[in-house]
Image (tube, rainbow, N blue to C red):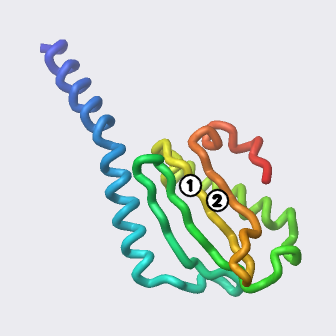
Amino acid sequence: MKKTMFALLYCLLFSVNATAGINVCKEATNNAEQYNRILPKKIDSVTTIINYIVNCEAKVIRHEKQLSVDPKMLNRSGLMKIYKKFVVKQCTTGYARYGWEVLEYYYDEKMVVAFIFIAKPENCKNQEQIDI
């Protein structure tokens, strides 16, 4: 009886784990569709989110944001704090915890890439060693 229950539990856990990638893809794609309907959207005094892209095959999510200030005016230590918060969020409640890579592209006013934040699944294991 115990062996049967263990085998049943093992099969159940394995099948949930095997379909988790499909569920994450579906959830991310649905989120992107919902966000893109309301974009562009100002999210703070200097940042507007302009696009949300999901690539299920590559397991990559990309947020694109535009800054209304010159990126050179931004404080490096402030950016580092924001980056660390981004990685912690992606590793605890975001898609990096499911093995996905999450990118945040920041553009200047002329739509030139100013900087990119990247949260990879391996960052979740080494959050103390994050550098920008």
Q: Quadrant of residue 32?
A: bottom left
Residue at the (45%, 60%) spot, across then down: 54
The one of 85 and 4 positioned closer to us in this rendering:
85
- The residue sitting at 73% across, 83% down in the picture is 109
For the residue labelled by badge 1, is the local secondary structure a helix, a strand or a loop? strand
On the rendered structure, is 98 left or right of 29?
right
Q: Judge depth for marks 1 and 2 and give the one in front.
A: 1
- Tag count: 2
Left or right of 9 in this view: 22? right
Closer to the chain start, of discs 1 and 2, is 2
Residue drawn at x 79%, y 65% is: 79
Residue nearer the viewer, 29 or 82: 29
Question: Label for residue 1?
Answer: none
Q: Which residue is mark 1?
A: 102
Q: Amino acid at mark 2?
A: Phe
Residue 24 percent location from the top left of the image: 37, 51
Left or right: 32 as drawn, with respect to 128: left
- Name the residue type under label 1: Val
Apparent side of residue 79 relative to residue 13 in the rendered image (left or right): right
The quadrant in which the C terminus is found is: bottom right
- Where, quadrant-wise, is the N terminus in this rendering? top left
Residue to which mark 2 is pinned: 86
